[in-house]
Image (tube, helix red, strand yellow):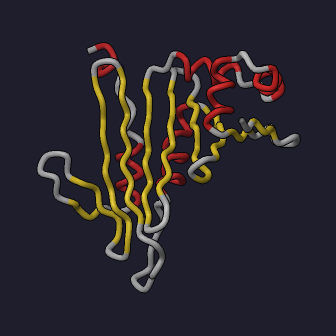
Amino acid sequence: MLIDIEPTSHAVRVDQDGFDALRAGTDPDAALAVSAARLGPALAVIDDPVVTLTLTVTGAHTRLEHRGWVGSDTATLLVALRPELFQLVTMPPAFLTSALVRLTRMRPRRPDDDGPDFGWELAADWAGGSHRLVASDGRDGLRLVDPVDGTPRPVSNTAAYRILSTLLPTDAELTG
């Protein structure tokens, strides 16, 4: 089990067992970590989210699954740093779109950019509904899969950012 708190920034890194121990609150090291890193709001939203998120990013040699929980005042992400190591990140929901952009690895590309290609799938689920986005990002640019006919369509990074910013449900979708 790994629960590591960086002393200066209070960044919390865990493996899956460490994350489970934080949630259960029964392990003495986990209880100390919750107190030292002020994880109360993060764990509260994990235990009772309005929306849950799953972001899977896949490249030629990597597959990372990030998870998230969003409440009215707090968003918590369990960011996969590598397949067996995670970092808990807590923020106001208003910053979630920026965090998702970083995690999807979207970036401007030049025509001669031979950087790695990535695909990602983002799912947001809540009681009574869900939103899904599927994308590929490579030499041919960013493409989002059309939810109606399944065709990958070219999109600018700006347009993708705007679409990501509408991922969370509206009040009408939550009460509907």
Residue 60 lies, with reference to residue 47, above or below; the image says below
Where residue 128 appears, as percent x and y from the top left, is 28, 19
| Occupied quadrant, residue 21 | top right
Q: How many marks?
A: 0
Residue at image location 38% in from the left, 48% down from the top: 162
Where in the figure is residue 11, as x and y percent of width and height? 75, 40
Of residues 80 and 138, the one nearer the viewer is 80
| Residue 121 placement, left or right of 38 | left
Residue 118 shown left or right of residue 8 in the figure? left
Position of the C terminus, as image quadrant, is top left
147 displayed left or right of 45: left
Say if 24 sits above or below 111 in the image. above
Decide which of 106, 67 is in the foreground and name it.
Answer: 67
Relative to 29, is 85 above or below?
A: below
Q: Specify the farthest residue to the bottom.
A: 112
Residue 109, image x and y in percent? Answer: 44, 74
Q: Position of residue 1 (x, y in %)?
A: 71, 35
Q: Residue furthest right?
A: 7
Front residue of 135/14: it is 14
* Residue displayed at 44% across by 29% down: 52
* Residue depicted at x 57% and y 22%: 73
Residue 138 vs residue 81, the one in the foreground: 81
